[in-house]
Amino acid sequence: MNKFANYFDYAAATPMLSEAKKAMEPFLIDKFYNPSALYLASKNNRQALQDARQVIASDLGVKPLEVIFTAGGTEANNLAIQGVLKNYPKGHVVTCDIEHKSVLKPVELFDHSIVAVDNRGFINLKELKKSINNNTVLITIGYANNEIGTIQPIKEISKIVKEIKEARRAKGIKTPIYLHSDACQAVNYLDLKITRLGVDLLTVNAGKIYGPKQCGALYVKTGCNLKPLILGGNQEHSMRSGTENLANVAGFAKAWQIVRQDFKLETRRVANLRDRLIKLINQQIPQATINGPFNDKRLANNISVTIPGFDNEILVMKLDEAGFQTATGSACSASGGEPSYVLKAIGLSNPKANSTLRITLGKYSTSKSIKLLAEALKKATNK
Ligand SMILES: Cc1ncc(COP(=O)(O)O)c(C=O)c1O
């Protein structure tokens, strides 16, 4: 059995690919040079940075200039939201109530509307439309939810945004409106072609795709007016100053190449394991209920399961003792705090939210490992 077969918390972190680590190594010692210096060794590093940018840009179908490397998904989300709103301080921003905190917290700094999701976590497009006003400059909706796996209809949302852009243009209104999506959980499994998605800004993250942590990127469409949050030496097209972390970026690009080259196949494999594991859980624990949508409307690797009467922290600990790493419904409840706001937003009571486990699969999950996990869960729920 592989080393990570019993790991089921891929939404939190992914083990780094050895190829990604290998791609990083030269830049830690031998090729430590600052990509901005003038000598040849630095020029080569500058080229390596551009090569990495090209990998991500060409897969997204965008220009390399439109990819800004950041220190992770949180920073990219902040750059998208605060970057747009800093240019339009009286502007209005729209999001929904199950977004990651790195979206919700910056949104709260500005005039905002939060659209409620339905009981499977989907945004209601009519409500979304209603929430947009003449000052709305940004709509930020995550591509796939990290707790319940809901895949939002980003293409439909982008049609709405396009209509508003056209209506404003026709009326001579200069206020822009941009669409941002946090795709941190989506890169392993979903279509990312920007022309198809129709977004102006997209957050991606290396730490969720078997690359290094504290590394990510923001796609910024040409013409999308952002103010940088980190000022200094004007690296990253002046959008993110600071000497580039070339080792991380090289590891990110290598991981990206590897996961994206066969992501459709891997999506089918993992979704199949997910559905079999859901079936096993339903058979062995009849009182268990699954939260979020099913089939291809759900992220391939996500299971959110409520087992009434059982405390999720205790279940996580029991499973850990049995050798399986899983998560509670939210990071907050994992640290002894409030029940998950995502689960509450889809209508779960506090006790149900506190009886919910998040099981997320990945590259090293197997038919055998899901069977063993289902058995361990059955044991853990035998009172
Ligand atoms: C949907 C989503 N957005 C943003 C983040 C934050 O990414 P990072 O930890 O790289 O800052 C995460 C990580 O948990 C996430 O799942």
Image: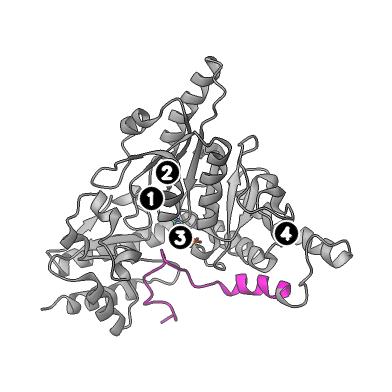
Q: Is residue 258 left or right of residue 280?
A: right
Q: Specify whether residue 327 is in view.
A: no
Q: Against 123, is 59 above or below?
A: below
**Residue found at the far right of this picture:** 39
- Magenta residues span 1-27
Q: Mark 4 or mark 2: which comes first in sequence? A: 4
Mark 4, other Cα within 10 Å: few <14 / some 14–19 / many ≥20: many
Residue underneath mark 3: 266
Mark closer to the chain start, 1 or 3: 1
Q: Amino acid at mark 2?
A: Ile
Q: Do the residues bearing badges 2 and 3 touch, measured as CB atoms within 8 Å?
A: no
Q: Which residue is mark 4?
A: 49
Point out which mark residue 86 bears: none
* Disc assigned to residue 141: 2
> Residue 35 location, x and y as percent?
78, 62
- Nearer mark to the viewer, of 1 and 4: 1
| Distance between mark 4 and mark 3 Cα atoms | 28 Å
The image quarter containing residue 28 is bottom right
Quadrant in the rendering for residue 291: bottom left
